[in-house]
Every structure is written in structure tokens, then in C-alpha cells.
């Protein structure tokens, strides 16, 4: 399974410290007061604890308790937001999504879309692995705006099924003038919550972040 992620992803809120949650789950403010009382009863009478120390402990406990409650509420809001997005994207299942800068090879030829500069002498669709390794270059006719990739690399070998990256290079007088992403279409079979938000499952068990889908169409549409 390959996972397609965006170049810029937001940070997700971190869950509260498990140890802190465990302590607070089994104690409350009343229990803490009882602990202070026992502490006061059993302190050294020749070296009693200063009253300010009690206040410090009380303030510390209150602050930690409020932080844990805040984290719990924040995690609940994040979960609700994710579930809302998931519900909204449920209608995407069964549709074809336009994959910005990516293509999925599942054993069948893939039509790759995009156009270079209108005044370019030459344009090429460059196919790379997700780690950026170049696999194939295909001449792109500016008038057609698309090219078919048979799933083979420059040496003629078939690439593994999965997700790949696309870019279009435009040349003027043999000099690279512009690079922009290509795109392709792939069937969406599942929507689910992932660590960075809603993810969509594509052919060949490829998984893509929903934010990278820039268009939708009915299956088989051209």
C-alpha cells in the first residue's frame, strides 16, 4: 500500500500525557484535599511545611486538571470535525477523483493529463516514484493535453502497482522554462479517517489525502 501525502501538512493536536490522564481519572479535587490533610497530619512538627507550599501544590493540581480537560475537549472537537468531513466525503465513494500531481498504476494503462506552456518548443510528462526517482519521460503534445502511460519505465520494465508523481516540463530553445504538476483520474473506493485527516482509497490500495483531489467526475467519463 502506498500513501500519497501533500507537501504541506498541518500539525495535529497531541493527546494528553497518558500518565497524567491515569492519575486524574482515578482522583479528583476532593481526593487531593484529603491527601493534603494527611500530609499536614504527618508532617514533622519541628519542620512544618510552609503554608505557601500547600498553595503551590493546590495551584499545580488545578492547572494540570484544567489542561487535561482542555486537551480532552480539543481532541473531541478534532474527532467531531474529522467525522463531519468523512460524512461529507461519503458521496465521493464510487466517483473518479482528479489527482493533482499524481497517478495510480494498477496494471492497466493510465491517461495522464496536463499542458505545457503554449509557446514551448517541447513538453514532457515526467513520471517519478514517490521518493522522486525518475522513471519515464513521455512527449506531451500541447494540442492534445494528454498522454497514455503503459506502466513501464525508461528501460521497458513494468513498474510495481501503486502511486506515482507527475510533472510537466516545458522547454523553450532547449532550456527548461517551467515545471508544473500533471494530473490523472482514479476511482475512489473508500473514505476513511487517517492520522492527518480524511484519506481516500484508490486502485492498487493507494491512499491519498482528500485535499489532493482537485476534481470529481462520474466513472468512465472522459
Image: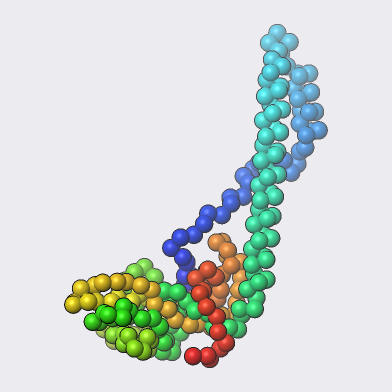
**At x 56% / y 61%, what residue is drawn?**
195
**Residue 15 visible in rendering:** yes
Q: Is residue 28 left or right of residue 131?
A: right
**At x 70% / y 50%, what residue is drawn?**
73
Q: Is residue 11 above or below residue 216?
A: above
Q: Observer-nearest residue: 198 or 155?
A: 198
**At x 55% / y 70%, what residue is drawn?**
210
Q: Is residue 28 above or below residue 77?
A: above
**Residue 157 visible in rendering:** no
Q: Is residue 68 left or right of residue 165?
A: right
Could you say which quadrant of the image residue 123 lies in?
A: bottom left
Q: Is residue 146 above or below residue 179?
A: below
Q: Position of residue 189 (x, y in %)?
A: 58, 80
Q: How many marks?
A: 0
Q: Position of residue 15 (x, y in %)?
A: 62, 50
Extreme residue toward the left, this view = 173
Q: Is residue 139 above or below residue 62?
A: below
Extreme residue toward the front, this view = 119
Q: Position of residue 203 (x, y in %)?
A: 51, 81
Tell me how the rendering is colored: rainbow
Q: Is residue 177 left or right of residue 222?
A: left
Could you say which quadrant of the image residue 24 lies in?
A: top right
Q: Position of residue 54 (x, y in %)?
A: 71, 22
Amino acid at each position: 500500500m502506498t500513501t500519497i501525502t501533500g507537501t504541506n501538512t498541518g500539525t495535529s493536536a497531541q493527546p494528553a500525557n497518558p500518565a497524567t490522564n491515569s492519575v486524574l481519572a482515578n482522583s479528583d479535587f476532593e481526593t487531593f484535599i484529603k491527601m493534603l490533610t494527611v500530609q499536614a497530619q504527618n508532617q514533622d512538627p519541628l519542620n512544618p511545611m510552609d503554608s505557601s507550599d500547600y498553595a503551590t501544590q493546590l495551584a499545580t493540581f488545578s492547572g494540570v486538571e484544567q489542561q487535561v480537560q482542555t486537551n480532552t475537549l480539543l481532541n473531541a472537537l478534532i474527532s467531531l470535525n474529522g467525522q463531519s468531513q468523512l460524512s461529507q466525503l461519503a458521496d465521493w465513494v464510487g466517483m473518479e477523483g482528479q489527482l493533482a500531481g499524481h497517478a495510480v498504476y494498477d496494471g492497466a494503462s493510465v491517461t495522464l493529463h496536463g499542458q505545457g506552456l503554449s509557446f514551448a518548443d517541447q513538453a514532457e510528462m515526467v513520471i517519478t516514484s514517490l521518493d522522486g526517482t525518475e522513471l519515464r519521460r513521455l512527449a506531451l503534445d500541447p494540442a492534445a493535453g494528454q498522454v497514455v502511460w503503459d506502466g513501464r519505465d525508461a528501460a521497458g520494465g513494468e513498474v510495481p502497482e501503486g502511486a506515482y508523481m507527475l510533472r510537466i516540463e516545458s522547454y523553450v530553445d532547449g532550456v527548461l522554462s517551467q515545471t508544473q504538476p500533471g494530473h490523472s483520474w482514479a476511482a475512489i473506493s473508500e473514505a476513511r479517517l487517517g492520522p492527518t485527516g480524511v484519506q481516500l482509497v484508490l486502485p492498487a490500495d493507494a491512499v491519498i489525502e482528500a485535499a489532493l483531489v482537485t476534481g470529481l467526475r462520474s466513472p468512465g467519463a472522459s
